[in-house]
Amino acid sequence: MTRPGGEEAMDPAQELYPDERESAQERHPDGRDPAAGERTFGALPPARGRAFARSWWGQAWLKALEDTALDGEQLKLGRRHARAGAVGAVSVRCGRITAVVQDRDHTRHRSDVLLQQLGVADWDRLLDLVADRAGHIAALLDRDMPPVLVGDAAAAGIELLPGIGDLEAECSCGAWDHCAHTAALCYQLARLLDQDPFVLLLLRGRGERELLDALQARSAARAQGPAGEAGAAGRGGAAGGDGAAERPGSGVPAVEAYAARDIVPPLPAAPPVAAPGVPPVLAGATPPAPGVAAAALEFLIGDAAGRARGLLADALSAGHPDAPLQPVLTPAQDAVRLAAAGPGEAIAARLAAGSGRDARALSLAVRAWELGGPAGLAVLEEDWTPEPEELARATGRLAASWEDGEARPRLRATRNRWTEAGGEVQLRYGRDGRWWPYRRESGQWAPAGTATDDPASAWAALSAEG
């Protein structure tokens, strides 16, 4: 493994402590080869001006860190280290990540973060679960971790993502809790998780090649069925079959073809669904019933056809049925969704009146919808107070968003909203734990950008606009 400049990326576990390596028996009680799944990633470039985690699973990793660490100042300093590129090559092994982190005075510290591995029984259940749903494997191969996979695992009693208290810190600086060095390592790992969720699975105890080989073996076993049954049927002799499996073009079971994914060409993609049909023209036909506008009805028919096309395309996609179900919208939410399609002033006025909004409120709701869907609309229209523990955590994260020496705005907190004193900008904290930038326009607060897990990024978006 080499660094971007061509320099050899030394395993950080030995860079400072060459004799300190866990034994294979310690890390792999089931006797598997510990070196088979070890990966070392070269030092990443500085991360100034970007969020550390953009994937939902990367954000979950950082939430586990931030919920576990007791000292917000150490987290802040760790973010600064990570943004400045002070984290060296990262070694990822079963149950442990390691890196050398350099302080501003150039003192280097070996830092480790430990995460409990899954047991043998847990891995057997997880592999059976994944092998039973081809979409799970396809998503992982696309470097994606669908929420339904994590949900299915949790339902089987297997926690893939870490939670509060799961990330254990060890550092040569002597800190007993997460220090700036282990925090920096965690922030850096979130960037690696964004690129490859197999890093998380390696931490939980299985490397990518080992995991895929095990899945392929399970798929092949399912293709054979009970011992000898598939072979006998395929030969068409002892079982009294007609030898159809030997005839050219007779094909093989789908699970068997999937198990042989490395040696057979991929199946062709499903043909794209044609554009939805043109809705009927109702104007000038039989007069509609009282209160029914022909143009509005034509618009609703076209919308229904478009949604049906989307559902069909989703059903034919490779990820189905692993894609999460879309939430059921309330009438007020659906009115905003329809208005976002640009139906024209007359229909927009009907949607505004029907949803209890005026034209200005509907316009703001459409903007919030376009930036964040139902979650964005909720942040615009809901005013709520987080629980005390969550409020304290959010306040701490916001306070840690500015580096030492930077001018900090004076913010006034009201429930889930932080407003600049005497200013025209505001941050709102959503129920999903994300931060939404807002700006005052014509006396009303209006959404000013998409949500981010990092309040500093949301504030930067406001500063850039200002």
Image (cartoon, rainbow, N blue to C red):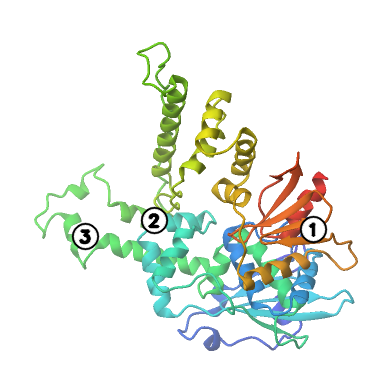
The answer to which quarter of the image holds residue 307 is top left
Q: Residue at x 40, y 69 (%)?
A: 155
Q: Is residue 382 above or below residue 337?
A: below
Distance (Cα) linking label 1 and label 3: 57 Å
Q: Choose the circle earlier in sequence order: 2 or 1.
A: 1
Asked if marks 2 and 3 touch (Cβ < 8 Å), the reply is: no
Residue 246 percent across, percent down from the top left: 21, 49
Mark 2 = which residue? 134
Q: Is residue 192 above or below residue 353?
A: below
Asked whether 455 or 148 is in front, the reply is 455
Asked whether 218 or 171 is in front, the reply is 171
Q: Choose the circle earlier in sequence order: 1 or 3.
A: 1
Q: Is residue 355 left or right of residue 7?
A: left
For mark 1, give the secondary structure. Answer: loop
Please tell me the numbered disc located at residue 206. Answer: none
Q: Is residue 127 left or right of residue 417?
A: left
Mark 1 = which residue? 48
Q: Residue at x 43, y 44 (%)?
A: 317
Q: Residue at x 47, y 84 (%)?
A: 31
Distance (Cα) linking label 2 and label 3: 21 Å
